[in-house]
Image (tube, grey):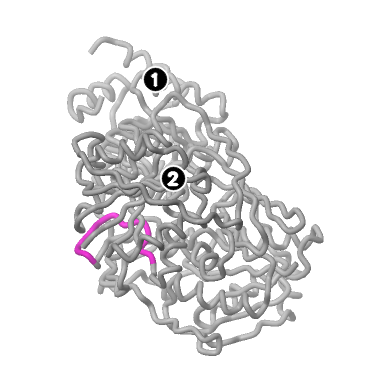
Amino acid sequence: MKLLISVKRVVDYNVKVRVKADGTGVETNGVKMSMNPFDEIAVEEAVRLKEKGVASEVVAVSMGPPACSETLRTALAMGADRGILVETEVALQPLAVAKLLRALAEREQPGMIILGKQAIDDDMNATGQMLAALLGWPQATFASKLAIEGERAMVTREVDGGLETLELRLPAIVTTDLRLNEPRYASLPNIMKARKKPIETIAPAALGVDPAPRLEIVKVAEPPKRQGGRKVASVAELVEKLTQEAKVI
Amino acid sequence: MTVLVLLDHDNHAIKQPARSAVAAAAKLGEVHGLIVGHDAAEAAAAAARLPGLAKVLHADGEAYAHALAEPLADLLVSLAPGYTHLLAAATAMGKNVMPRVAALLDVQPISDICGVEDGETFIRPIYAGNALATVRSHDGKKVITVRAASFDPVALEGGNAPVESIPPRDASALSRFVSTELSKSERPELTAARVIISGGRGMQSGENFHLLDRIADQLNAAVGASRAAVDAGFVPNDYQVGQTGKIVAPDLYVAVGISGAIQHLAGMKDSKVIVAINKDEEAPIFQLADYGLVADLFKALPELADELEKPR
């Protein structure tokens, strides 16, 4: 079974983002970029399935400017077999990404597509579900456990109030939550080996998809600042403040 | 404009995030509620009592028993022609179903809105709430999930909407519910609690969470945790408050032994009053807290419980 995974290049999760003064977005110039952490979990899960002999090939896809090939190299260094870069300068939104992935899925015929549950930049949490809809495949979002049993996948999902297990008919879409696995660090020899693995570059038009955004970004602003920082000296003072001043208990 | 809101329920009552989604929908136009489930007539009756609904649609069938995305999305798409906006709370259910609906309608969904400007313009957090984006949708229909903490829920009672039964549609055989492991608790749910007390890595073990339990009982509070505490295995994942866990905005949030990682702050910074108890006075959580207490939590928590016992 072939696995397709998607990896997004995003501002590194340790970076404190700054809103641009002109309100058009968030500063990304000169900022450290990394693979979206939920996508790392997707890569790790796919590579483990290959190591177990469940999967035969892991194909990683990234979309965006040429620098996304670095993100693909990271996936290849973690153990993916080859990469596909859908190259575009358009700021892609989930609907366009889902359509591009559908086109690739129709070409590659994977048995499963694993995606991060959301990207930590736009926080949309949508692409996996949308791709499942477009392909007419079942979906299991927010996965914390995944097992393949023949033509079925058993997926445990993180839901409000606990966990839920679903059985999906393959091919299927799985999106990853934090506790699915702990992604490995690529070793130096594997990073070297990844340089020789193939990356195919393709344009959205070649996949028959119009990548134009549907949501117009009117403006991006800082959230309101919270006034905090007051200290109390004792538990008794804390309770007094909460009852007398804040009146919340 | 007519708005359809997919309502989270437990077959009996309407969940609080769904009532917040109704409040958001009311800013857009006439609101219809949708109850999908199996043997959920009681929930449909509860929905009819929510103020602000002009009508409740109720689809009942075995295929809907576990809110699987495939049959729910199929149903919503079949109802979509009558509506300009389709909404749900950004709960596990809403987040799972609504993007699937949007793709089937060829629409870019608008996730996790925290503000409504007009019928096509919405505010939503990006970068874990470190920035707010105002976005305008040029799609014919808007498919939206609502950040419940940003909208005061409508009341439980006061409405009297007619309930209209709609037939279930053919079930898809794409996925099958196997089992569920829900955490049992006598306490309010995190997303509905007026008071939340959360523990972090500073709690040192799962057993030590009983120190929070006693105070939670006194304040009728929900107990939460930081991602660090969940990852350390102290408590189950559904305790997690934060960008990737639950987004909450109670009247009072007490953070105990939590340093204040960005991802945790993103999940609770809209709380009305924040208290931090931490022995590290440099912890970032103190910059956000209305009342900070620099103290060893193993001393402060029993003391707090004793103080709360006193008649006030």
Instruction: Determine whether the residue tagged by mark 1 lies in a helix, strand or loop.
Output: helix
Residue B206 placement: quadrant: top right
Mark 1 lies on residue: B217
From the image, give the main secondary structure of the stretch colored magenta. strand
Q: CA distance from mark 2 to mark 1?
A: 37 Å
Residue B84 placement: quadrant: bottom left
Task: Note whether residue B133 is visible.
Answer: yes
Which quadrant does the C terminus of chain A fall into? top left
Q: Is residue A35 magenta?
A: no
Toward the right, the furthest residue is A53
Q: Position of residue A21 (x, y in %)?
A: 26, 71
Q: Position of residue B195 (x, y in %)?
A: 33, 30
Q: Which subunit holds the residue at mark 2?
A: B
Q: Which subunit holds the residue at mark 1?
A: B
Q: What residue appears at the point 55 percent right and 30 percent down from the top-left corner? A: B204
> What segment carries the magenta color?
B109-119
Where B134 falls versus A99 (above or below)? above
Front-most of A71 and A130?
A130
Instruction: Determine whether the residue tagged by mark 2 lies in a helix, strand or loop.
Output: strand
